[in-house]
Amino acid sequence: MIGLAYARAFTEDLRALVGAEITIGTPRIETVRADSVIEDEQPLARTTCKNKKNAEEQYHCLVSRSMAVTLACLLMGHTEERLKEMRELPLDEETLDAFGEVMNLGTAVLSRLFTDKYGLPPVGVLSTVELTSPMEDTEWLVDAEYLRCHFPVNIPGYGDESLVIVFPPNVAHEWFGVDIGPFAESSGSEEDQGELDEDAIESTSIVFIEPNEETRNEMEDLEDDMIHSIWTIDPEEFDPDELDEFAEVGAFIIEWDLDIRTGLDFVECLREDEHLREVPILMMSATPSEAKVRTAIRSGANSFVRKPIDLDELQSRLDPLLLARQRAEA
C-alpha cells in the first residue's frame, strides 16, 4: 500500500535528517468535504507541492505550527529549552525555511519511491506558509471534496502530532484513480470511461473478524450490495500459525474489542507476515474514540469504521486502499 510504504521510508529519512527517533504511522485515508479538511482550530503550516511536469496538479501538506517549529529546530540543532520557547512563537523566516527543507525531503521521498514503481509524477515544494488561524486562507479549498491522508506522527518528548496530505479531486483521479467530486458525478467520454474501467476496483475477499455471531450474519449480508465476497471469522477460530489461507484476501476488518485477545493483536500478527503486511486493515468499533483510532493507526491499521457498519462509510474508507494496492501490484 502506497501510504504505508511512504510512512516507513519518510520515517527513516526524517530520522537521519533531524537526528531524532520520530515515527510516522500508517495513514488513515478518507474522502472529506472541504469544510472538514482541517480538523482543528490550531495555527498551521501549509506546504503546497506540485507535479514537476504539470504545475496545475498540486496537493497540500498540513501540520500544526508546533510540529513545524519542532522539526525546524531539530534540523537547526537548537537546544530543548530553545525549542520549547519557539513552539510558542510564530514562524519566523529562518524557521520557515528550515521546515521547508523537511518538506523538501518529504517530496523527494515520494518521488524516489513511487515515480518508477507506481507511475506517480516527480513532485516538489511550491511554497510553505503559516496560517495563524486554519481558515485564514481558503482560496486553495476550491472543490467540494478532497482525498485526505492523515499520518500520525510521534515526536519523542513532544507527544503526538499529525501530517495531513490533501489531494484535490483532479490529483486524486489522475494519480490514484480515485473518483471523487466532479469525477464521481460525471461518466465522461467513452475514451475517458475506458481509462476509468482500467482503474476500476477488482472484486476480492474481505475478511471480518468479529466475535458476535449475529453481527457476523449482518456483515455477510453486506455481500449483496458489494462486488466483494465477505468472509466472517470468529476470533476464537483464528489460527495465527495458518495464515496461508489468507494469501489472496483483499482486506481485513477487525473488531477492536475481542474476548480472546485484542484487535490490535490481530493487526500486529498480520503485519508480521511477509505476505500480508501490505494488505489493508480497518479496525471497527461502536465507540471509535480518537485515542482508539490513533492507537490502531500506530499499530499498523489503515483506517477505522464505526459499528454498525454503514456500507457507504465502509466503501469510502476501503476503496482507496484497495485501488492503491491493486495499482501497486499491477
Image (cartoon, helix red, strand yellow):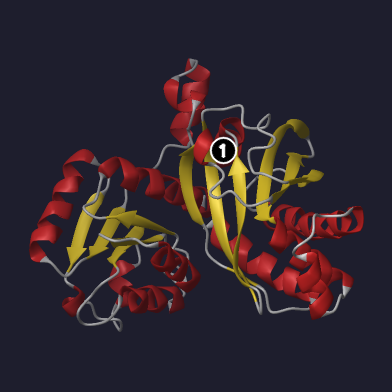
Considering every residue shown, the one lying at the far top of the view is 189
Q: Give the amino acid type for the residue marked by disc 1 in the picture.
A: Ala
Residue 15 appears in the picture as rendered: yes
In this image, 325 relative to 283: left or right? right
Residue, x 74% and y 53% (percent of image)?
A: 107
Q: Give percent across and percent down for residue 73.
A: 82, 69
In this image, 219 relative to 3: left or right? left
Considering every residue shown, the one lying at the far left of the view is 214
Q: Give percent across and percent down for residue 140.
A: 67, 32
In this image, 35 relative to 246: left or right? right
Count of marks overlaid on the render = 1
Residue, x 17% and y 79% (percent of image)?
A: 236
Judging depth in this view, the residue of 148 and 8 nearest the camera is 148
Judging depth in this view, the residue of 288 and 29 nearest the camera is 288
- The residue at which mark 1 appears reads as 172
Q: Can you say whether 193 is above or below 119 in the image?
A: above
Q: Give percent across and percent down for residue 111.
A: 73, 52
Q: Give percent across and percent down for residue 94.
A: 91, 58
Residue, x 31% and y 73% (percent of image)?
A: 263
| Quarter of the image where one finds residue 101 | bottom right
In this image, 86 relative to 120: left or right? right
SS of the residue at dot 1?
Answer: helix
Residue 202 appears in the picture as rendered: no
